[in-house]
Amino acid sequence: MHISRPRRVAVLSVHTSPLAQPGTGDAGGMNVYVLQSAIQLAKRGVEVEIFTRATSSADAPVVDAAPGVRVRNIAAGPFEGLDKADLPTQLCAFVAGVLREEARHEPGYYSLIHSHYWLSGQVGWLARDRWGVPLVHTAHTLAAVKNLSLAEGDTPEPAARQIGEQQVVAESDRLVANTTDEAKALHELYGADPTRIDVVAPGADLTRYRPGDRDSARASLGLNPGEIVVTFVGRIQPLKAPDVLLRAAAEVISRRPGLPLRILVVGGPSGTGLARPDVLIELARSLGITAQVTFLPPQAPQRLADVYRASDLVAVPSYSESFGLVAIEAQACGTPVIAADVGGLGVAVRNGETGLLVQGHRTEDWAGALESLVTAPKRLAELAAQAPRHAENFSWEHTADGLLESYRKAAVNYNNGTGPSDFSPRRARGLWRLRRTGGVR
Ligand code: UDP
């Protein structure tokens, strides 16, 4: 066991690949988090192997994603057409793939497991017991939190997910939370021991997301240099609430005829309800603002930086957000953010300094806040000037340092036997039985 830093970490990301294009389907901030934190860990000398589910017959079993970062595509269930809700049926196949891979190496090949999202936590819990190494878990989102602030018509997360999350919380050596609010939720709603939670903020790739020339960014996207551009970036789903922005924009346009406002929506379908961008196209039509709304498909990071630079304001109206990477990336590019005051957005945006936080999702509140910014270029410029400095507090380098500290504490807990339930009679009995029958090395 390497107490200072692990030699090799098995990162589990069952439901979505770090190599998928974020901003559509099930791919979003978590994919970016898993890949970017792995790259930074590898730069610090920790090898990272990311296990994910193969979703295409074209997926090679092993892909070297970056120096020191290897992605293992595990065959578990059909490549395509498996709904996220059906993923629990494939956990056994996935865990078998992970255990078989480890069994091909010498004992101690992986020094630590870091699981992302509760499905991976379930796999990590079993691998932890088999390999005798600590488990660190990041929830990213929590059913109990999400269900407290559902968008209208959105489907609540099933009780089974919450039970699964609860088990992972109980079985992890350490939990990583994005914010102190998430740490509080883990403690209050899931009974997590607060001394076993580490708050580690996610980041942005500050080499890619940095201020740049607005006019050339607009030209590259075919946007009019004279318009006021307000942009939504993300998966198009009810939770992300792009409809809140469209309704508010329609209200502002009706109050201010002639205001050259353009709403840019960047992202692809995901989940239920608003899943089809068509629904937003129809909404724009019914609001009478079709001519003022532009839709773009999901963009690769280098193009996305131009999207942020081309925008006067980025809107993040989500009903629930564990952090909101888009808000940090936009500010890093020198663009202020108008965001719902939920979850991590209260940390990601400095209200009144780098953007505005809006309470609730009522059209009149959003229209008022939006109008106060898009009609005040001087105010927008002041917010824009402060945004990059705030964003500098959030980098993947910082995140990796925080994770390494959490890994160190996990190893200490584990070695001291102060992990979650290592030495509970129930577990000790179970392991003893397995050992007697030669089931555990
Ligand atoms: N993203 C992207 N291209 C797009 C839209 C989004 O690469 O067209 C990325 C974006 O850069 C961000 C992530 O997807 O890093 C979304 O993360 P966020 O935390 O904002 O939302 P989540 O998807 O986790 O709910």
Image (cartoon, rainbow, N blue to C red):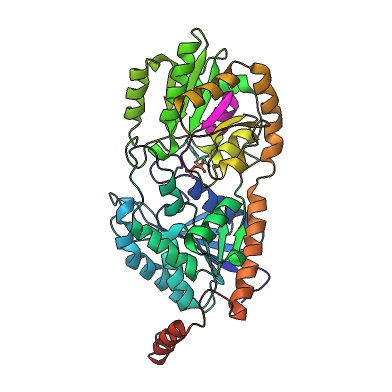
Query: In terms of depth relative to the viewer, which is nearer, 129 or 238?
Result: 238
Up the image or down, 161 lies above or below 103; here it is: above
Instruction: State the quadrant of the N terminus.
Output: bottom right
- The tally of labels here is 0
Left or right of 81 on screen, residue 437: right
Kindly tell me whether residue 6 is visible in this rendering. no
In reply to whether residue 380 is colored magenta, the answer given is no
Q: Position of residue 219 (x, y in %)?
A: 55, 19
Figure check: 359 above or below 399? above
- Seen at 31% across and 53% down, the residue is 85
Q: Quadrant of residue 159?
A: bottom left
Q: Residue furthest top?
A: 258
Q: Residue 299: percent from the left, percent from the top?
A: 48, 34
Residue 139 seen by the camera: yes
Q: Is 117 positioned to the left or the right of 403 in the image? A: left
Q: Residue furthest bottom?
A: 436
In the rendered structure, the answer to whether residue 405 lies left or right of residue 253 reads right
- Vertical position of residue 114 compared to residue 205: above or below: below
Vertical side of 164 occupied by 353: above or below: above
Question: Residue 75: image x %, image y %?
Answer: 34, 61
Quadrant of the image occupied by residue 158: bottom left
Residue 307, position in %: x, y? 54, 28
Q: Which residues are magenta?
A: 303-320
Viewer-side residue, 59 vs 326: 326
Q: Is residue 280 left or right of residue 198?
A: left
Residue at the (36%, 65%) spot, across then down = 94
Residue drawn at point x = 59 percent, y = 66 percent: 196
